Amino acid sequence: MADTVREVERKYEVPDGGRLPDLTGAAGVAEVVDQGTATLDATYYDTADQRLAAHGVTLRRRTGGGDAGWHLKLPAGPDARDEIRAPLSDTLPAELAALVRSRVRDAELVPLVRLLSERDVRHLVDADGALLAELSADRVTARRLTPGPGEPVRWTEAEVELAPGGDPALLDALEPHLTRGGVRRAAAASKLARALTETADPAGAEERAGAGERAKTGATAGAAAEGTAGATVLDYVRAQIAAVVALDPAVRLDAPDAVHRMRVATRRLRSAFRSFRKVLDRAATDPLADELKWLAGELGIDRDREVLTARLEERLRELPDELRAGPVAARLGAWARERRGGTRDRLLGVLDGDRYLALLNALDALSADPPLRPAAARPPEDLLVEAVERDYRRLAALVTTALAAPPGQDRDLAMHEARKEAKRARYAAEAARPALGRPAKAFADLMTGLQELLGDHQDSCVARRALRELAEQAHTAGVSAFAFGVMYGREEALAARREAELPALWAEASREKHRAALRRRPRRGASRR
């Protein structure tokens, strides 16, 4: 079973023959405790074209030290990486292989580099003896294994790693003391990155660098000229493709909000394909949009359950004790567990399936060789404004229908459709923001507010259907359904409030000045950002 550890650390280069400064008394460090020396032997794996390295991901099998085993490190923000550890074995554990699949696809993982490190470890502790951080000095010997063993390279580096739950500000506080002692921040993000650079075959280094960059972006240079509508749209599309790929491991690890964020990326892609059809040929994007809709649906099964369960639990917490007749919490918990059953396994099966892999490959192909239409060469301002306004007009028609519909199912459905269109208009404005600046952000903010109101209304509709089901189950079981009825009434009242709030919110969001700001051109030399 793999374990996940969040590492927050900084690496430093140490001059040959250099010594680390004594940090006693620096930034709350009361004592530096020597922990001895460990010998570490790590073999790093990647594809031949270094797809993992291109994404800042490292995969290694290491012996020695206190955590021998397989280690997969995924970027998690500035100075931070998530390390997923699995027990030592001769072959790559299946759970780690799954976590790199979105980046590796069907390519073979091969041993690229072997690193031998003699590590001196010291603990930085406070006045109470609590661990603040670990300071280590590594004397590294690196040897390239693929395409064939080469000459080794050697260097010394230092690393400061926060204790679990430590304050990242400690790294900033310690850094001046380290640099005054003669060390400096490492240029490479990891030992592997440095080893790959210093052991590279000069004849093939440029080609590998280009392949790595394409692995990160899926892009080829010159596909759309800089400063055109095509370049703006492609930047947005590629960012969403990268998000899907990067979030795959987090979804597999069941990280908080990962499913939602991945689903949003698929929706943004679909919206971009529709909103910017003058830029990207629909003959190529429509089949991808269909597959993205399928993936969003599979992601939504578990996500929708999570959102609904959280909403019902919140409504239950709002009830005073005297209104909680019967085992309400127990029934709600059992209902939620029953709904969850199998959805997690189903989603993992989707991510391990050929259809999903084919979608990722197709998205990469589109990014590398985009099906640009002639309008892609136009300046971005006019074309992107047209796209945003086109989405706005569709939204306006749906909101008008919703406002005219009588209360009940027809209005509920109309508001739900308007919510989806508000989301598309928001995404179009977000994609256009690099070209249109602050007016696009302001318009996107308006669409977000409208989307949230309409979304809260839709969530209330879904919650009421679930509460009816729970009440019927309670009645059948011969226990009180009163609490579910009270919760239903509160949801009904909330939906009515959202319906009453819609006209005023729409009156503001639909003011001509917001769209006029999008069309306005800045004065020469001025910036809209």
Image (tube, rainbow, N blue to C red):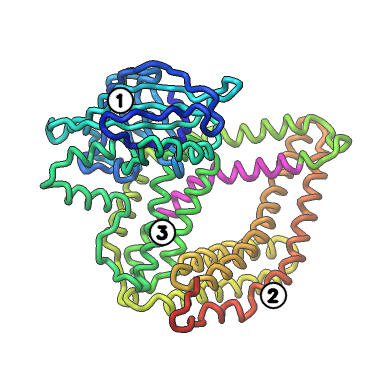
Give the magenta range: 289-315
Label 2 CA crowd tier, 10 Å (few <14, some 14–19, many 20+): few
When asked about the image quadrant of residue 122, the answer is top left
Question: Type of residue at label 2?
Answer: Ala
| Tag 2 secondary structure | helix
What is the distance, in whole Å, between disc 2 and disc 1 at their CAs?
Answer: 60 Å
Q: Position of residue 438 (x, y in %)?
A: 53, 71
Q: Is residue 93 above or below residue 221?
A: above
Comparing 140 with 359, the one in front is: 140
What is the distance, in whole Å, between disc 2 and disc 3 at their CAs?
Answer: 32 Å
| Tag 3 secondary structure | helix
Q: How many marks?
A: 3
When asked about the image quadrant of residue 152, the answer is top left
Question: Type of residue at label 3?
Answer: Ala
What is the distance, in whole Å, between disc 1 and disc 3 at their CAs?
Answer: 39 Å
Question: Type of residue at label 1?
Answer: Arg
Q: Position of residue 134 (x, y in %)?
A: 45, 26
What residue is disc 2 on? 507
